[in-house]
Amino acid sequence: MSQPAIYRLQCKTQSYDWGKLGSESKVAHFASQSGAPVDPSKPYAELWMGTHPNAPSIVIGNTATDDQTSLKSLIENNPHLSTQAIHDEFDGDLPFLFKILSIRKALSIQAHPDKVLGARLFKDVPSIYKDPNHKPEMALALTPFEALCGFRPLNEITQHLEKYPEFGELVGPQITHNFISTVADNTSNEDNNKHVLKQLFSSMMTSSEEDVSRLLKTLTCRLSQSPASELDELDQLVLRLDQQYPGGDVGVFSALLLNYVVMAPGQAIFLGANEPHAYLSGDCVECMATSDNVVRAGLTPKFKDVNVLVEMLTYRYGSAESQKMNPVPYGSRSLLYDPPINEFSVILTKLDANQDEKHPSIQGPSILLVARGAGQLTGEALKTESDFCLKEGYVYFIGAGTPLNIHADSEQGLELYRAYKA
Protein backbone atom coordinates (compact mmCIF):
# COMPACT_ATOMS: atom_id res chain seq x y z
CA MET A 1 0.00 0.00 0.00
CA SER A 2 1.27 3.48 -0.85
CA GLN A 3 2.14 5.85 1.97
CA PRO A 4 -0.87 8.09 2.76
CA ALA A 5 -0.37 11.84 2.40
CA ILE A 6 -3.21 13.16 4.58
CA TYR A 7 -3.51 12.56 8.31
CA ARG A 8 -6.02 13.80 10.83
CA LEU A 9 -4.41 15.33 13.92
CA GLN A 10 -5.31 15.60 17.58
CA CYS A 11 -3.99 18.93 18.82
CA LYS A 12 -3.26 20.14 22.32
CA THR A 13 -4.53 23.21 24.15
CA GLN A 14 -2.59 25.64 26.32
CA SER A 15 -4.16 27.28 29.37
CA TYR A 16 -2.97 30.81 30.14
CA ASP A 17 -4.63 33.39 32.36
CA TRP A 18 -5.60 35.61 29.42
CA GLY A 19 -7.57 32.88 27.63
CA LYS A 20 -11.35 32.77 27.25
CA LEU A 21 -13.15 30.53 29.73
CA GLY A 22 -14.69 27.17 28.86
CA SER A 23 -17.08 26.99 25.94
CA GLU A 24 -16.71 30.73 25.26
CA SER A 25 -13.31 29.86 23.79
CA LYS A 26 -12.91 28.84 20.14
CA VAL A 27 -9.87 26.90 21.34
CA ALA A 28 -11.97 24.78 23.68
CA HIS A 29 -14.72 24.36 21.09
CA PHE A 30 -12.33 23.12 18.41
CA ALA A 31 -10.50 20.82 20.83
CA SER A 32 -13.79 19.32 22.00
CA GLN A 33 -14.49 18.11 18.45
CA SER A 34 -11.71 15.55 18.98
CA GLY A 35 -13.26 14.36 22.25
CA ALA A 36 -11.44 16.65 24.71
CA PRO A 37 -13.60 17.57 27.74
CA VAL A 38 -14.23 21.26 28.41
CA ASP A 39 -13.94 22.70 31.93
CA PRO A 40 -16.18 25.81 32.11
CA SER A 41 -13.91 27.47 34.68
CA LYS A 42 -10.64 26.90 32.81
CA PRO A 43 -9.07 29.47 30.45
CA TYR A 44 -8.44 27.93 27.03
CA ALA A 45 -5.94 30.29 25.41
CA GLU A 46 -4.25 28.45 22.53
CA LEU A 47 -4.60 25.38 20.33
CA TRP A 48 -1.25 24.29 18.88
CA MET A 49 -1.08 22.53 15.52
CA GLY A 50 2.40 21.33 14.62
CA THR A 51 5.54 19.66 15.89
CA HIS A 52 6.54 22.02 18.73
CA PRO A 53 7.83 19.86 21.63
CA ASN A 54 5.78 21.77 24.22
CA ALA A 55 2.49 20.58 22.68
CA PRO A 56 3.12 18.20 19.77
CA SER A 57 0.21 17.14 17.57
CA ILE A 58 -0.68 13.45 17.45
CA VAL A 59 -1.76 11.48 14.37
CA ILE A 60 -5.19 9.85 14.82
CA GLY A 61 -7.66 7.80 12.86
CA ASN A 62 -5.29 6.29 10.32
CA THR A 63 -4.72 2.56 9.91
CA ALA A 64 -1.09 3.12 8.92
CA THR A 65 -0.26 4.53 12.37
CA ASP A 66 -1.23 4.06 15.99
CA ASP A 67 -2.94 6.76 18.00
CA GLN A 68 0.25 7.79 19.80
CA THR A 69 2.35 8.60 16.73
CA SER A 70 3.42 12.23 16.90
CA LEU A 71 3.41 14.36 13.80
CA LYS A 72 7.14 14.89 14.21
CA SER A 73 7.75 11.12 14.30
CA LEU A 74 5.63 10.70 11.19
CA ILE A 75 7.68 13.30 9.32
CA GLU A 76 11.01 11.99 10.61
CA ASN A 77 10.13 8.51 9.39
CA ASN A 78 8.77 9.79 6.09
CA PRO A 79 10.82 12.85 5.04
CA HIS A 80 9.10 13.02 1.65
CA LEU A 81 5.93 14.21 3.45
CA SER A 82 7.80 17.42 4.23
CA THR A 83 10.31 17.20 1.32
CA GLN A 84 13.86 16.18 2.08
CA ALA A 85 15.13 19.76 1.84
CA ILE A 86 12.61 21.13 4.39
CA HIS A 87 13.08 18.08 6.61
CA ASP A 88 16.84 18.62 6.70
CA GLU A 89 16.68 22.41 7.12
CA PHE A 90 14.30 22.23 10.08
CA ASP A 91 15.56 18.98 11.63
CA GLY A 92 12.33 17.07 11.07
CA ASP A 93 10.11 19.83 12.45
CA LEU A 94 7.60 21.88 10.52
CA PRO A 95 8.93 25.36 9.64
CA PHE A 96 5.90 26.94 11.31
CA LEU A 97 3.56 26.59 14.28
CA PHE A 98 -0.15 27.00 13.51
CA LYS A 99 -2.43 28.15 16.35
CA ILE A 100 -5.89 29.23 17.40
CA LEU A 101 -5.94 31.97 20.06
CA SER A 102 -8.95 32.90 22.22
CA ILE A 103 -8.24 36.11 24.13
CA ARG A 104 -10.21 37.33 27.13
CA LYS A 105 -7.77 40.00 28.30
CA ALA A 106 -4.77 41.75 26.84
CA LEU A 107 -1.49 39.94 26.22
CA SER A 108 1.81 41.64 27.00
CA ILE A 109 3.35 44.53 25.11
CA GLN A 110 6.07 42.66 23.24
CA ALA A 111 8.28 42.27 20.20
CA HIS A 112 10.12 39.35 18.67
CA PRO A 113 13.83 39.51 17.81
CA ASP A 114 15.25 39.01 14.34
CA LYS A 115 17.60 36.08 13.73
CA VAL A 116 20.75 38.02 14.64
CA LEU A 117 19.35 39.31 17.93
CA GLY A 118 17.66 35.98 18.65
CA ALA A 119 20.99 34.18 18.35
CA ARG A 120 22.70 36.69 20.67
CA LEU A 121 19.96 36.55 23.29
CA PHE A 122 19.98 32.76 23.22
CA LYS A 123 23.74 32.75 23.73
CA ASP A 124 23.75 35.37 26.48
CA VAL A 125 20.55 34.49 28.40
CA PRO A 126 19.46 30.94 27.49
CA SER A 127 17.38 30.68 30.65
CA ILE A 128 14.99 33.30 29.22
CA TYR A 129 15.47 33.09 25.45
CA LYS A 130 15.16 29.41 24.64
CA ASP A 131 16.28 29.26 21.00
CA PRO A 132 18.25 31.30 18.44
CA ASN A 133 15.42 31.71 15.93
CA HIS A 134 13.31 34.70 14.95
CA LYS A 135 9.54 34.65 15.47
CA PRO A 136 7.58 36.54 12.81
CA GLU A 137 3.86 35.89 13.15
CA MET A 138 0.56 36.57 11.43
CA ALA A 139 -2.91 36.82 12.98
CA LEU A 140 -6.14 36.32 11.00
CA ALA A 141 -9.33 37.30 12.81
CA LEU A 142 -11.93 34.56 13.37
CA THR A 143 -14.17 36.89 15.36
CA PRO A 144 -13.98 40.67 15.86
CA PHE A 145 -10.41 41.14 17.04
CA GLU A 146 -8.45 43.94 18.73
CA ALA A 147 -4.71 44.51 18.89
CA LEU A 148 -2.07 47.14 19.46
CA CYS A 149 0.30 47.05 16.52
CA GLY A 150 3.15 49.36 15.49
CA PHE A 151 3.65 53.01 16.39
CA ARG A 152 0.90 55.48 15.58
CA PRO A 153 1.36 58.37 13.14
CA LEU A 154 3.45 60.96 14.95
CA ASN A 155 0.80 63.68 14.79
CA GLU A 156 -1.56 61.37 16.71
CA ILE A 157 1.05 60.90 19.42
CA THR A 158 1.45 64.69 19.61
CA GLN A 159 -2.30 64.99 20.10
CA HIS A 160 -2.16 62.41 22.91
CA LEU A 161 0.64 64.26 24.68
CA GLU A 162 -1.66 67.27 24.72
CA LYS A 163 -4.92 65.45 25.49
CA TYR A 164 -3.46 63.30 28.27
CA PRO A 165 -1.22 65.60 30.38
CA GLU A 166 -0.33 62.65 32.61
CA PHE A 167 1.43 61.11 29.60
CA GLY A 168 3.50 64.23 29.03
CA GLU A 169 4.38 64.45 32.72
CA LEU A 170 5.52 60.83 32.73
CA VAL A 171 8.01 61.28 29.87
CA GLY A 172 9.08 64.71 31.05
CA PRO A 173 8.76 68.28 29.68
CA GLN A 174 12.02 68.32 27.71
CA ILE A 175 11.34 65.08 25.81
CA THR A 176 7.73 66.16 25.25
CA HIS A 177 8.92 69.48 23.81
CA ASN A 178 11.56 67.84 21.61
CA PHE A 179 9.03 65.40 20.21
CA ILE A 180 6.31 67.94 19.49
CA SER A 181 8.69 70.48 17.92
CA THR A 182 10.42 67.86 15.75
CA VAL A 183 7.13 66.46 14.47
CA ALA A 184 5.87 70.00 13.74
CA ASP A 185 9.04 70.84 11.80
CA ASN A 186 8.29 70.19 8.12
CA THR A 187 12.03 69.95 7.38
CA SER A 188 12.55 67.10 9.86
CA ASN A 189 13.57 63.84 8.17
CA GLU A 190 12.55 60.29 9.06
CA ASP A 191 15.74 59.61 11.02
CA ASN A 192 15.06 62.61 13.25
CA ASN A 193 11.45 61.52 13.71
CA LYS A 194 12.50 58.00 14.71
CA HIS A 195 15.08 59.42 17.09
CA VAL A 196 12.57 61.49 19.05
CA LEU A 197 10.06 58.62 18.96
CA LYS A 198 12.68 56.33 20.49
CA GLN A 199 13.46 58.97 23.15
CA LEU A 200 9.76 59.24 23.99
CA PHE A 201 9.19 55.49 24.17
CA SER A 202 12.39 54.91 26.16
CA SER A 203 11.51 57.60 28.69
CA MET A 204 8.04 56.15 29.15
CA MET A 205 9.22 52.54 29.52
CA THR A 206 12.02 53.39 31.97
CA SER A 207 9.90 55.62 34.21
CA SER A 208 9.86 54.71 37.87
CA GLU A 209 7.11 52.41 39.12
CA GLU A 210 6.06 55.14 41.54
CA ASP A 211 5.57 57.70 38.76
CA VAL A 212 3.73 55.22 36.53
CA SER A 213 1.39 54.19 39.33
CA ARG A 214 0.72 57.78 40.47
CA LEU A 215 0.07 59.18 37.01
CA LEU A 216 -2.04 56.23 35.89
CA LYS A 217 -4.19 56.66 38.97
CA THR A 218 -4.60 60.35 38.16
CA LEU A 219 -5.44 59.60 34.54
CA THR A 220 -7.94 56.81 35.21
CA CYS A 221 -9.65 58.73 38.02
CA ARG A 222 -10.06 61.70 35.71
CA LEU A 223 -11.50 59.56 32.90
CA SER A 224 -13.76 57.62 35.27
CA GLN A 225 -15.32 60.85 36.53
CA SER A 226 -16.27 61.92 33.00
CA PRO A 227 -19.72 61.05 31.63
CA ALA A 228 -19.58 57.80 29.65
CA SER A 229 -20.89 59.63 26.58
CA GLU A 230 -17.76 61.84 26.59
CA LEU A 231 -15.27 58.94 26.61
CA ASP A 232 -13.91 58.06 23.21
CA GLU A 233 -12.57 54.70 22.05
CA LEU A 234 -9.07 55.32 23.37
CA ASP A 235 -10.32 56.57 26.76
CA GLN A 236 -12.30 53.36 27.16
CA LEU A 237 -9.30 51.25 26.13
CA VAL A 238 -7.05 52.92 28.72
CA LEU A 239 -9.62 52.24 31.44
CA ARG A 240 -10.05 48.63 30.35
CA LEU A 241 -6.32 47.90 30.28
CA ASP A 242 -5.89 49.46 33.72
CA GLN A 243 -8.68 47.26 35.09
CA GLN A 244 -7.07 44.16 33.60
CA TYR A 245 -3.60 45.03 34.93
CA PRO A 246 -4.24 47.13 38.06
CA GLY A 247 -1.58 48.64 40.24
CA GLY A 248 0.21 50.79 37.68
CA ASP A 249 1.40 48.88 34.60
CA VAL A 250 3.33 51.08 32.16
CA GLY A 251 1.85 49.03 29.33
CA VAL A 252 -1.40 50.97 29.77
CA PHE A 253 0.36 54.11 28.54
CA SER A 254 1.50 52.17 25.45
CA ALA A 255 -2.02 52.47 24.08
CA LEU A 256 -1.28 56.18 23.53
CA LEU A 257 1.76 55.33 21.38
CA LEU A 258 0.73 52.19 19.49
CA ASN A 259 -1.98 51.78 16.87
CA TYR A 260 -5.29 50.44 18.11
CA VAL A 261 -6.22 47.99 15.35
CA VAL A 262 -9.72 46.52 15.06
CA MET A 263 -10.15 43.62 12.63
CA ALA A 264 -13.27 42.01 11.22
CA PRO A 265 -13.25 38.25 10.55
CA GLY A 266 -10.95 37.52 7.61
CA GLN A 267 -8.72 40.55 8.15
CA ALA A 268 -5.09 39.97 9.13
CA ILE A 269 -1.97 41.63 10.46
CA PHE A 270 1.65 40.55 10.05
CA LEU A 271 4.05 41.17 12.93
CA GLY A 272 7.61 41.22 11.67
CA ALA A 273 10.77 41.20 13.74
CA ASN A 274 11.38 44.11 16.14
CA GLU A 275 7.86 45.55 15.90
CA PRO A 276 5.86 46.27 19.09
CA HIS A 277 2.43 44.72 19.49
CA ALA A 278 -0.11 43.25 21.88
CA TYR A 279 -3.25 41.23 21.20
CA LEU A 280 -6.20 42.62 23.20
CA SER A 281 -9.32 40.51 22.61
CA GLY A 282 -11.06 38.12 20.25
CA ASP A 283 -10.32 34.83 18.50
CA CYS A 284 -7.75 34.45 15.74
CA VAL A 285 -5.85 32.00 13.63
CA GLU A 286 -2.14 32.61 14.17
CA CYS A 287 0.84 31.30 12.25
CA MET A 288 4.43 31.85 13.34
CA ALA A 289 7.96 30.67 12.86
CA THR A 290 8.77 27.98 15.40
CA SER A 291 10.36 29.93 18.25
CA ASP A 292 9.62 30.92 21.85
CA ASN A 293 11.52 34.23 21.76
CA VAL A 294 9.47 37.07 23.20
CA VAL A 295 10.80 40.37 24.60
CA ARG A 296 8.16 41.79 26.96
CA ALA A 297 7.85 45.22 28.52
CA GLY A 298 4.31 45.78 29.78
CA LEU A 299 0.83 44.37 30.53
CA THR A 300 2.38 41.32 32.11
CA PRO A 301 3.56 39.97 35.45
CA LYS A 302 6.33 38.11 33.59
CA PHE A 303 9.94 39.21 33.16
CA LYS A 304 10.25 42.57 31.39
CA ASP A 305 13.37 43.16 29.32
CA VAL A 306 12.83 46.88 28.79
CA ASN A 307 16.34 47.84 27.71
CA VAL A 308 16.47 45.13 25.05
CA LEU A 309 13.02 46.11 23.77
CA VAL A 310 13.87 49.80 23.54
CA GLU A 311 17.03 49.10 21.54
CA MET A 312 15.61 46.43 19.22
CA LEU A 313 12.58 48.25 17.79
CA THR A 314 12.60 49.69 14.26
CA TYR A 315 10.49 52.73 15.27
CA ARG A 316 8.56 52.59 12.04
CA TYR A 317 5.28 54.47 12.32
CA GLY A 318 2.07 54.65 10.31
CA SER A 319 -1.71 54.34 10.43
CA ALA A 320 -3.71 51.52 11.96
CA GLU A 321 -5.09 50.56 8.56
CA SER A 322 -1.56 50.29 7.15
CA GLN A 323 -0.89 47.46 9.60
CA LYS A 324 -3.44 45.21 7.89
CA MET A 325 -2.46 42.75 5.18
CA ASN A 326 -3.81 42.73 1.64
CA PRO A 327 -4.57 39.11 0.61
CA VAL A 328 -4.56 38.05 -3.03
CA PRO A 329 -6.94 35.62 -4.80
CA TYR A 330 -5.98 31.96 -4.70
CA GLY A 331 -8.12 29.66 -6.81
CA SER A 332 -11.73 30.64 -7.35
CA ARG A 333 -12.91 30.91 -3.74
CA SER A 334 -9.79 31.36 -1.63
CA LEU A 335 -7.49 34.14 -0.45
CA LEU A 336 -3.74 33.90 0.09
CA TYR A 337 -2.06 35.75 2.97
CA ASP A 338 1.60 35.78 2.02
CA PRO A 339 3.87 37.62 4.47
CA PRO A 340 7.42 38.69 3.52
CA ILE A 341 9.13 35.72 5.20
CA ASN A 342 10.01 32.19 4.10
CA GLU A 343 8.55 29.99 6.84
CA PHE A 344 4.82 30.17 6.09
CA SER A 345 1.83 31.48 4.20
CA VAL A 346 -1.89 30.93 4.93
CA ILE A 347 -4.81 30.20 2.59
CA LEU A 348 -8.37 31.06 3.66
CA THR A 349 -11.11 29.17 1.78
CA LYS A 350 -14.81 30.01 2.19
CA LEU A 351 -17.44 27.93 0.42
CA ASP A 352 -21.22 28.08 0.34
CA ALA A 353 -23.28 24.87 0.39
CA ASN A 354 -22.39 22.44 -2.44
CA GLN A 355 -19.50 24.57 -3.68
CA ASP A 356 -16.11 23.14 -4.57
CA GLU A 357 -12.56 24.45 -4.53
CA LYS A 358 -9.28 23.02 -5.79
CA HIS A 359 -5.92 23.67 -4.16
CA PRO A 360 -3.08 22.88 -6.55
CA SER A 361 -0.07 20.89 -5.43
CA ILE A 362 2.04 22.75 -2.85
CA GLN A 363 5.73 21.92 -2.76
CA GLY A 364 6.00 21.72 1.03
CA PRO A 365 3.97 20.44 4.01
CA SER A 366 0.77 22.06 5.26
CA ILE A 367 -1.79 21.93 8.05
CA LEU A 368 -5.49 22.48 7.39
CA LEU A 369 -8.05 23.57 10.01
CA VAL A 370 -11.83 23.49 9.56
CA ALA A 371 -13.13 26.62 11.28
CA ARG A 372 -16.78 26.33 10.25
CA GLY A 373 -19.16 24.00 8.46
CA ALA A 374 -18.74 20.53 7.01
CA GLY A 375 -17.74 18.79 3.81
CA GLN A 376 -15.26 16.40 2.22
CA LEU A 377 -11.58 16.53 1.33
CA THR A 378 -9.97 14.48 -1.42
CA GLY A 379 -6.27 14.33 -2.18
CA GLU A 380 -6.03 13.85 -5.94
CA ALA A 381 -2.58 12.30 -5.90
CA LEU A 382 -3.45 9.56 -3.41
CA LYS A 383 -3.57 5.93 -4.49
CA THR A 384 -5.21 4.84 -1.23
CA GLU A 385 -8.64 5.63 0.18
CA SER A 386 -8.64 9.40 -0.08
CA ASP A 387 -11.95 10.85 1.12
CA PHE A 388 -11.69 12.69 4.44
CA CYS A 389 -14.50 14.15 6.49
CA LEU A 390 -14.37 17.87 7.14
CA LYS A 391 -16.06 19.04 10.33
CA GLU A 392 -15.67 22.10 12.50
CA GLY A 393 -12.53 21.75 14.60
CA TYR A 394 -10.98 18.98 12.50
CA VAL A 395 -7.27 19.40 11.74
CA TYR A 396 -5.33 17.62 8.98
CA PHE A 397 -1.68 17.37 8.04
CA ILE A 398 -1.20 17.43 4.24
CA GLY A 399 1.97 15.95 2.84
CA ALA A 400 4.03 17.81 0.27
CA GLY A 401 2.91 17.71 -3.35
CA THR A 402 -0.73 16.75 -2.69
CA PRO A 403 -3.39 18.56 -4.75
CA LEU A 404 -6.71 18.89 -2.91
CA ASN A 405 -10.37 18.84 -3.88
CA ILE A 406 -12.57 20.50 -1.25
CA HIS A 407 -16.36 20.13 -1.23
CA ALA A 408 -18.87 21.81 1.07
CA ASP A 409 -21.87 19.69 2.01
CA SER A 410 -25.43 20.38 0.91
CA GLU A 411 -26.60 22.16 4.07
CA GLN A 412 -23.64 24.11 5.45
CA GLY A 413 -20.92 26.26 4.07
CA LEU A 414 -17.26 25.59 4.81
CA GLU A 415 -14.44 27.76 6.12
CA LEU A 416 -10.86 26.44 6.08
CA TYR A 417 -7.47 27.82 7.03
CA ARG A 418 -4.39 26.16 5.58
CA ALA A 419 -0.84 27.03 6.66
CA TYR A 420 2.00 25.86 4.46
CA LYS A 421 5.65 26.17 3.59
CA ALA A 422 6.23 26.35 -0.16
Image (cartoon, helix red, strand yellow):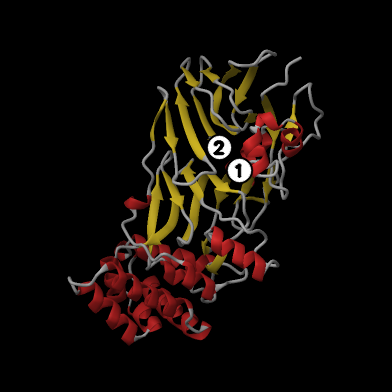
Q: Is residue 128 left or right of residue 233?
A: right
- Image coords of residue 102 (percent x, y): 56, 48
Q: Which mark is residue 95?
A: 1
CB under 8 Å between discs 1 and 2: yes
Instruction: Name the spot of residue 92 as percent of width and height, x first.
Output: 70, 41
Q: Which residue is mark 2?
A: 421
- Circle 2: residue type: Lys
Local SS, label 1? loop
As drawn, the label of residue 364 is none
Residue placed most toward the observer, 155 or 422: 422
Vertical comparison of 131 with 325: above or below: below
Corner quadrant of residue 161: bottom left
Q: Is residue 160 left or right of residue 253?
A: left
Q: Position of residue 96 (x, y in %)?
A: 59, 44
Q: Which quarter of the figure has residue 59?
A: top right
Residue 49 visible (yes or no):
no
Residue at left 56%, top 65%? 295
N-terminal label among 1 and 2? 1
Residue 162 visible somewhere in the drawing: yes
Query: What residue is shown at x 69% (from left), y 66% (from top)?
Result: 126
